[in-house]
Amino acid sequence: MVGTLEVQVVECFQVKSTGSLFSGNKLFVNVKLDGVEARSASLPEAAGGVRWDFSTQMVCPQHAANLELQLKREGLFSSHFVGGCSLPLQQISGTLEQEVPLWDGSRSEVGRLRICISKSGPKTGLMNLAGSQIVSGSDRPALTPAPTQSLAGGLVNRASVAAGSLGTVGSSLENYARSATTDLESRPAFARGSSQALANLAAAREDGSRPDAVRRANELLVEVDPFDASREEHRQKLAQAVERLRHASNADLSGPLGQQTLSSCDARIEILFNDAMQHRNEKDAHGALWLAGRLPSPEDAEVTLQLRLRQKWDQHSSKEALQRASDLLPAAAAGGLELEDFMDALDLAEFHSLRSQQGSASAAVEKLLKALEKPLFGTVQQLLRDNPDKAEAIFGTLGARRTEALGLQSLQQQLLREKGLQLLKAALLPSPGQIGFPELRRRKLRHAILTARGALDDPMTRVALHSMMQEVGPSCFAHSTESSVWFLRALIELLPEEQVHPSVRRCLQERPADQMVAILTQSKELLAEINRELPDGLLPDEWQQLRQEVRQALARGNEAELKTACQKLIDSPAGVFYQRDVQQVVAKLRSAFRLPPSWSVESMVRGSDVKLLAKNEVTDSRLLKLFDELLRSTALPHVRTRDRRGLPPRNYRAVRAVQIMNAPTWSSYLQRRDHVLQQCMKVKARSDAGFWRDRLNGELMTEQILADRMEVSAFTPLKREANEVWLFHGTSHAAAEGITSDDFDMTRANPSGLFGAGVYFAESVSKADEYVKGKVVGGVELFPLLLCRVCLGYVYYCDERRPSARALEEHCLLEDWHSVLGDRKKTSNTFREFIIYDNLQAFPAYIIYYAREY
């Protein structure tokens, strides 16, 4: 066994930070003995340096050769090697405190570590044979001396060379446990706990403190008395004394010797700090500050040594910075690097003054700025005429706060104004051979706008800008639509609305009508990118008149007048520019007619000159597929009635469909449905699936396919409580157009029908197909089928073979029922039919054009 090695890692410095997202700035150090890690510690890096405060002790075997120190940087997924060093153990003896270089894989120095290493030899002297853990087994008798009256304590001096054998041990050690003079049962003063073993008075207590820390620190300080700050040996012993005190308990530090030692360290650290300041050695000054920070101090101390020294350092640094600024003042008035150094010195003086908490440097800084104000004003004024770029560099050096303090805002505004106008003019004026307004010019214009906007608070800038725009505008409008559009954008971004249209209205009116519309349309789209709108004053008078008519109709609240005014506005180019007015009309009409949210009011306005109506082709392939599935699933090819002409088709195929958006018909239908719902609640009419299954001979065939399909119902769900359902109505092409444009015409209802004069609906396409009339379109005969929302309400169930038609009509017209279900499926094994006697109880939602398959 060679001994024990204690390594204390104090500080790492001169290591470059990365700040990388994946590398991080967290360093950790590994201490290894011949490649075996003893301990590691980490700390976030700051300003190229990391300070640790940890130590480790390791057993140093006979064959140990090298102590290794490695520095690594923690990454997001792993860590990577920064640098390291290796120290031969043969070169270490006693206590060694030094800085060691860190080398990377290419043998380049990447930083330095400050470490303290203590190496101690093997334990010699007394061996405690009373401790049974030392020997065991068959070896114990060989190491245990024969019982003797002179060895009651169990101590043997193994260090004496003269002690040749166990038989002579008694002659080399005085026995303090002689039975004649001492009680053998008494506990020795050097025993630890309840054992009879020796106590190690240098070992750490349970709280980590060391009993001899204060004494050892005091001994180190005595060795360097008087203290000489210029001697490296004295500085090292002071540092070792501070580290010893860090291992002392609070009780030991509060004792007389502890207070004396702390006071002595305090005085020596201040001597070291004052010496560093006297010799302008910033590194040693920071070293003293660091040492002061490591010196233990009472928790209730208001001002620590480190804080006191730091305040002293800040005061000194602030004065030095002010002196440097004063020396630079004459040269700073010319601008250049001297001005930059002058401003840096002022900033440094203010920074250290605030940290010192011992007064402010603001008065001295203000005095220096006042002395600089007049000569620098003249310099900048001259540069604005001769070299604006250098004047701009000066403002960049000063910053906003110093520019204001030096009274240079007016010159800065002048610079911004001249530069902004110059850039704007260069970006807007078309060059020879220019086509459109290319991307490079757009970037230049955006930069020019940004520059000019900085000077718009100045009234002179706005006047100059307005004048320049009047000069450039005609050339832009004469060049191309693109140049005109970007000119308008710049104008609207920079000038108030009241100053925009007088400048360009005449230029716009001189353009052909189609180009004027193109310029305004493209300008609107371009301005939308920056959340701006075209001023109303730029739009033609006739467009503004159309908007006025819409606003008057909105005020009067007449739907028909509102629809007409809105249609005129939408049909003109003005509709694009007055979208707010259009949206107000849309909201008003949607609310007035209770229109479904998915209906396009704009298309309804355009769809008809008479009413709010649109018939839009269904382009959704999923909806067309659903209609095709509906026809095929409700087909009953083996069922035939007397109304069938020719053979029944085997199946039906949906070819196309048209969605009906008829605002007046829809509004009337909803009013009637609401009234039916109230009556159903009054008579407690049932609408549940059990009622349909048990009382009405089964659920609807259409229900199985269209149940809760919101896209079919225009996202306006059916009112199940009013027995609102989907049913078919077969008719001719002309009748389908008429019904969907107006509503079901009850005057055409057949009074001789089996169930009376009503509107008949079917749940099966095969039944509705018996009444359709086809037309050849594109070589294929297509048949129209209306898919309707029908409000059946309180349903009268009729399963008579020959019912009284007049009685059924009276049930629904004079009594509480709203519709009749004629069950010919039960009586004749054919179809169920559904009859309403009020045409407002049905709304034709789609026309499905289908082909027959035989």
Image (spheres, grey):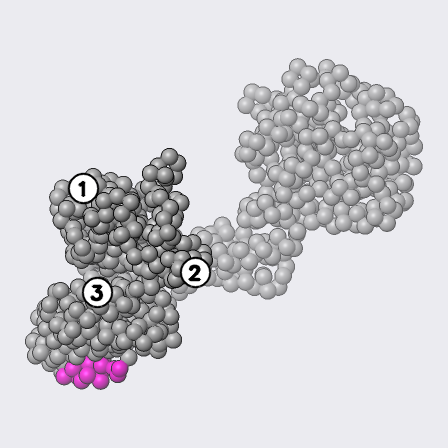
Mark 1 secondary-structure assignment? loop
Image coords of residue 536 (percent x, y)? 42, 63
Q: Which amino acid does label 2 sit on?
A: Asp
Image: magenta residue range: 358-371
Which residue is more in the foreground, 53 or 93?
93
Residue drawn where x is 12% and y is 65% of the image: 232
Residue depth check, mark 2 versus mark 3: number of the one nearer the observer: 2
Q: Which of 248 and 648 is in front in this view?
A: 248
Q: Mark 3 points at which residue?
A: 239
| SS at badge 3 | helix
Quadrant location of residue 781?
top right
Q: Residue 626 carries which label?
A: none
Amino acid carrying label 3: it is Ala
Query: Which amino acid type corresponds to the residue marked 1 in the rendered image?
Result: Ala
Q: For mark 2, what is the residue?
A: 183
Q: Which of marks 3 and 1 is nearer the N terminus?
A: 1
Q: Distance between the residues labelled 2 and 3?
A: 47 Å
Q: Which residue is drawn at 78% across and 18% down?
A: 640
Kindly identify which numbered label has been placed on residue 65. Answer: 1
* Residue 191 horizontal/vertical position (percent): 39, 58
Which of 662 and 828 lies nearest the eye of the viewer? Answer: 828
Near mark 3 (Cα within 10 A), the count class, few <14, some 14-19 or many ≥20, is many
Residue 138 vs residue 216: left or right? right
